[in-house]
Amino acid sequence: MSMGGRKKRGCTRGVGLNKINNVLDKKMEINISTKEGRPTNAVQSVKLSNELGMIVRNILPVKPRWTKLTEVEMQITFDKLKQKLDVKGLRTDEEVCASIKKLLSLKSKDQRYRLHMYYLNHGKDSKPSTVSMTERIDLCTYWSKEKIHGSHDSRTCEDVVLRTCMAEGPFTF
């Protein structure tokens, strides 16, 4: 007996922006305020944030530090953003470029944090589906180094997990 046959909803990320672009017959314009560093219009701000989040999750490689991204990787990111949105001054205005890079760095930091929590909770055994094997190996070796826990404390990641479990009390099933 087949389990298929029922139509599922499917991925809905970016569908709203695609509909807006189809209705307008052009890409949505995004005007970034140089004073605030983000769009002042609420719809523009939401669409820019969603698109940057998808770019960070799907295209941008996860590196231990934001500064380790190459110029080629940033260029690919800007090209992908330009495919979906018409950001005024993306290539010409330095303040707009700096604002976009700042937003991307915050999204990248959030992605790294989520992967780090996944690493602490699940260890090296299970692989998250969002990163490649080489990125996973690089991040696991980075997180397993003692220096990231501070110079005053030389605990390993396993010690941190063990102490956290002990602080929460006995396990209940």
Image (cartoon, grey):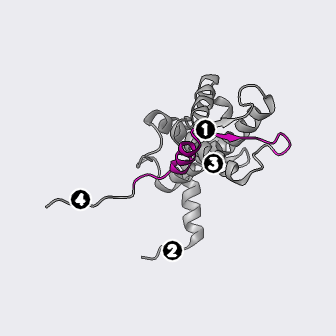
Viewer-nearest of discs 2 and 3:
3
Do the residues bearing badges 2 and 3 touch, measured as CB atoms within 8 Å? Answer: no
Do the residues bearing badges 2 and 1 touch, measured as CB atoms within 8 Å? Answer: no
Of pointers 4 and 2, the one earlier in the residue sequence = 4
Q: Residue at x 66, y 35 (%)?
A: 86
Magenta segment, which residues? 10-36
Residue at the extreme left: 1
Taking the magenta stretch, the answer to whether it contains residue 17 is yes
Of pointers 2 and 3, the one earlier in the residue sequence = 3
Residue at the extreme top: 72
Question: For mark 4, what is the residue?
Answer: 5
Three-letter amino acid code at disc 3?
A: Lys
* Distance between mark 4 and mark 2 Cα atoms: 45 Å
Viewer-nearest of discs 1 and 3:
1
Question: For mark 2, what is the residue?
Answer: 170
Question: For mark 3, what is the residue?
Answer: 47
Of pointers 2 and 1, the one earlier in the residue sequence = 1
* Distance between mark 1 and mark 4 Cα atoms: 36 Å
Residue at the extreme bottom: 172
Q: Residue at x 59, y 35 (%)?
A: 63
Three-letter amino acid code at disc 4?
A: Gly
Q: Residues within 10 Å of mark 1 (few under 14, many from 20)?
A: some
Residue 27's label in the rendered image is 1
Q: Residues within 10 Å of mark 4 (few under 14, many from 20)?
A: few
Three-letter amino acid code at disc 1?
A: Lys
Q: Position of residue 40 (x, y in %)?
A: 78, 49
Taking the magenta stretch, the answer to whether it contains residue 14 is yes
